[in-house]
Amino acid sequence: MDDRGIRQTDLIRAAQKRGARLGKSQLSQYVNGRTLPRQDSLELLASLLGVHADWLAWGKLPEAPQALPMSSNQYAERPSTPNAARRMPSNASGAVHPGQDVPSTDAVPVSTATQTSEPTSADTFDSASKLTASTAHAEKHVATQQVPTSERTPVMRHFKKSSKLNNVLYDVRGPVVDEAARMESEGMRILKLNIGNPAPFGFRAPDEVVHDMRQQLPDGEGYSDSRGLFSARKAIMQYCQIRNLPNVTMEDIYTGNGVSELINLCMQAILDNGDEILIPSPDYPLWTACATLAGGTPVHYICDEQAEWNPDLDDIRSKISPRTKAIVLINPNNPTGALYPREVLAEIVEIAREHQLMILSDEIYDRLIMDGFEHTSIASMAPDLFCITFSGLSKSHMIAGYRIGWMVLSGNKRCAKDLIEGIHMLANMRLCSNVPAQAIVQTALGGYQSVQRYIVPGGRVHDQRDLVYEALNQIPGISAVKPKAAFYIFPKIDVKRFNITDDEQFALDLLHEKHILIVPGKGFNWHKPDHFRVVYLPRRRVLTECMEDLADFMETYRQA
Ligand code: PLP
């Protein structure tokens, strides 16, 4: 009951609602394990809790035994027959009379109880709460019972998540998404603008990629080299040559099950407990999550909305400490759609040089640049620093489900010899990445890049971006910087106008009222409640309707 937050007074009140009386002292004596309630009270209690009275009394039902939750690895007596389930006080019938004190030597066989009845009314408490109450009752007696070890049955132990996960957040698939899933399970249609997954919005993998994967599938049965297939790495190396990444050999390229796996792997390899790593705010939250999980301390530097969401260089400088090991860039950026100009990159290289930081650059959207802008890989500007550049095919080839990404070590590898050994060991430990997906890297990176047609005027990504950008900026109280790349926009909300103090609540309210799923800014480690992210992958028709709904919602929205 304590665990579930049910108080004895709640039960008494629930009984009153039914026009029945449940004695306060009777209930408390029962919960404290001193007496069993009278039969009528027991039955009332059982019905309120939605369980069987026998189980409440004896910790078991006559048939179909099953384990009961216990708080620790305590043991309970294993009954030799169903009727010997509980050692009874000495009286003729062997029964405990209602209201009778339970002698302290009695044992309640809590390990073999089951619960079959379902809660039936609004004033019935859930069964798990009952388990706790009964368990408390039982535990008291079990603890005092001397039972030979050979006759004991281990009872269920509760497993908590590791404390390493305590501060790990990944709200792109977080509580608002759980609520959307619940609504969907009730038959509601939700427009999901929460995740950059192109396939459900009709973006198909290039035919050639699918064809080549089918063709090579029979050859992809075994593990590959832990870095990846030769053909895949060769293609990635040539890609690096075109992008001017310095000092890259075949040994410096690692394929992964998406960039996600490699982010995690690197954080584990790089960070000691307490090491600091500079990560943008807003960020793609996997970076912060993996850095935290690895024991590191993510230190967020601000990206400045007033400066087209470019990193705030002064903020970066002010956040460097002797423990800072690395700086992360997400360029092009998720969630803002920003693309960093060379001058900004040059300044970041300068800062990294001055403080001898390694540079980790997530460039998974580097082939999704619009408006004639060009992407520069920061590693190409830092031959004297150790850099790791991340990219993959999930977005550029619309094959997020195939799980293929890579990372490239470049520049000054002498200063990272030991770290590279660690990276290699972790890569070996996971054996290799998905081999059939590696097999299409060469096809994907070579020749005609079909993604091009999406990002030029008239192309889906380009035109959807324009539509959303314009529509958002027409909503009073909402403003957004025009994204230059990727397929995200990170609009600002005038929090005063809407009295918004909690952006997750805003996302939930929008979900409930308009069935539109967005991710609140806090999901991207943005520490004010004034932003949210929209994925503009749906077709224009859908986006138009969605923007109308959003405008309609904002017209009257005020957070309580
Ligand atoms: N990095 C960024 C910036 C992303 O937005 C994403 C996915 O949305 C990833 C990495 C993960 O990509 P992958 O599918 O390669 O694991």
Image (cartoon, rainbow, N blue to C red):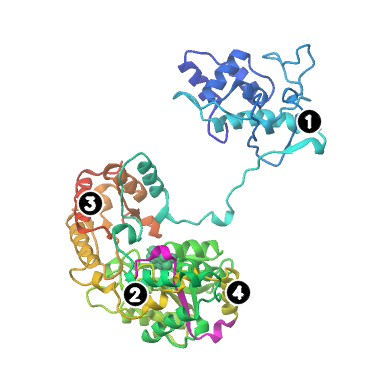
Q: Amino acid at mark 4?
A: Met
Q: Residues within 10 Å of mark 2 (few under 14, many from 20)?
A: many
Q: Of helix, strand and loop, which one carries label 4?
A: helix
The range drawn in magenta is: 397-417
State the image coordinates of residue 440 (x, y, percent, origin top left). 41, 74
The alpha-carbon separation of the residues under discs 2 and 3 comes to 28 Å
Q: Which residue is mark 1?
A: 145
The alpha-carbon separation of the residues under discs 3 and 1 comes to 65 Å
Which numbered disc, 4 or 3, marks the residue that appears first in the sequence? 4
Which numbered disc, 1 or 4, marks the residue that appears first in the sequence? 1
The part of the image, by quadrant, that contains residue 486 is: bottom left
The alpha-carbon separation of the residues under discs 1 and 2 comes to 68 Å
Q: Of helix, strand and loop, which one carries label 3?
A: helix
| Residue at 24%, 61% in the rendered image | 480
- In this orientation, which residue lies closer to the viewer: 402 or 489? 402
* Label number found at residue 425: 4
* Label number found at residue 366: 2
Q: Residues within 10 Å of mark 1 (few under 14, many from 20)?
A: some
| Residue at 56%, 68% in the rendered image | 268
Is the CB–ligand 1 distance for label 2 below 8 Å?
no
Which numbered mark, 1 or 2, is in the foreground of this view? 2
Which numbered disc, 2 or 3, marks the residue that appears first in the sequence? 2
| Residue at 53%, 69% in the rendered image | 221
Which numbered disc, 3 or 1, marks the residue that appears first in the sequence? 1
Q: Of helix, strand and loop, which one carries label 1?
A: loop
The alpha-carbon separation of the residues under discs 2 and 4 comes to 28 Å
Q: Of helix, strand and loop, which one carries label 2?
A: loop
Q: Amino acid at mark 1?
A: Gln
Where is the C terminus found, in terms of image quarters?
A: top left
Q: Quadrant holding ligand 1?
A: bottom left
* Label number found at residue 546: 3
- Looking at the image, residue 350 sits to the left or right of residue 435; the answer is left
